[in-house]
Image (cartoon, rainbow, N blue to C red):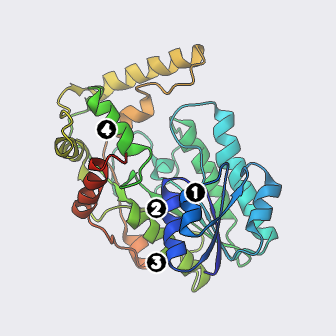
Amino acid sequence: MNRVLVTGGGGFIGLALTRELCRRGVKVRILGRHRYPEAESAGATCIRGDIRDLGTVTLASAGCDTVFHVAAKAGIWGPFQEYFAVNVTGTLNVVAACKKKGVQALVYTSTPSVIFDGHDLEGVDESVPYAAKPLCHYATTKILAEQQVLQANSEQLWTTAIRPHLVWGPGDTNLIPRLMARGRAGDLRIVGDGSNLVDIAYIDNVVHAHLLAADNLLATATAAGHSFFIGQQEPVLLWSWINELFVRMDVPKVNTKLSLGKAKAIGWLLEKVHGILQLEQEPKMTRFLAEQLALSHWFSKKNAKTLLGYSEKVTTEQGVERLVRWLQDGRS
């Protein structure tokens, strides 16, 4: 890699990726809606713009050999049109711009949510089909976007999709801060019996996987056209992991339990109320969230290991120590 574009380079994954690329001496350009001083201080050039605008994406892609398409509208609530415009139209623009400007490799940041179907997923691999009836717009549009990226794979443009699950670590702006806030407010319940195993992905490992994917596409391209699950070497007991973190941070442990059936019923009701009242704020519970909190979802990393050479660089225990230090420094 010599010249790289990172869409969403100011976000959690995008910024960590940008910093590592700059550290390696790669010339990095990031595309986002704002200026990002942290990315600029690392050595990146910021281009302000929207991935929903093809002309902007095309201009930003010029002269690059690799594009990391990280930008997305995340979350589990909001108008479908917004999710579609960013996640699908934006991705189509990235693919089109890459082809027009002769970009060689496109690494897309996807999610395991594309296969989440309301059942336990235990050690499954990438052969599992996309969910037939996803319960949130995020999953629906990420399915469509990943399909477009992988279908675009050719000798003209090698493409691949990385599916990290529950990304966490220092610098997290979403998962851990939200958990901590709801924990301190006493606003969390163990959904289900608390025995569900879940994959998590430390940020450094996620960056490592993205770089391995790009290196592969620019060399042998054996990863081209494939998607890859990324996470820690072993899944964690979700609620035990959360409570152990809470204990370290003097946050009350979560002990109260709520059945999956009740949680889904509450989620369905809140979704209806928020929809009727056109509330922008995300409901405290949705059907998708209930299933995510109650069911097991962990994945085989065999394909990532075989084709990309992926293995975790930071263990879960090491990652927790780094995360706790960061949180204790008050930077969450």
In the displayed structure, 193 sits above or below 42; it is above
**Where is mark 1, residue-wise?**
37
Quadrant location of the N terminus?
A: bottom right
Instruction: Name the front one of labels 3 and 2.
Output: 3
Residue 119 seen by the camera: no
**Where is mark 3, residue-wise?**
307
Apparent side of residue 239 relative to residue 119 in the rendered image (left or right): left
Disc nearer the start of the sequence (2/4)? 2
Q: Name the residue rendered at 54%, 73% in the picture.
A: 22
- CA distance for labels 2 and 1: 37 Å
- CA distance for labels 1 and 4: 26 Å
Dot 1 amino acid type = Pro
Task: Give the SS element for disc 3.
Answer: helix
Disc nearer the start of the sequence (2/1)? 1
Disc nearer the start of the sequence (1/4)? 1
Instruction: Name the front one of labels 1 and 4.
Output: 1
Disc nearer the start of the sequence (3/4)? 4
- CA distance for labels 1 and 3: 35 Å
Task: Give the SS element for disc 2.
Answer: loop
Asked if marks 3 and 4 touch (Cβ < 8 Å), the reply is: no
Apparent side of residue 270 relative to residue 156 in the rendered image (left or right): left
Res 180 label:
4
- CA distance for labels 3 and 4: 36 Å
Q: Nearer the viewer, residue 328 or 203?
A: 328
Disc nearer the start of the sequence (1/3)? 1
Dot 4 amino acid type = Met
**Where is mark 2, residue-wise?**
126
- CA distance for labels 2 and 4: 32 Å
Residue 307 seen by the camera: yes
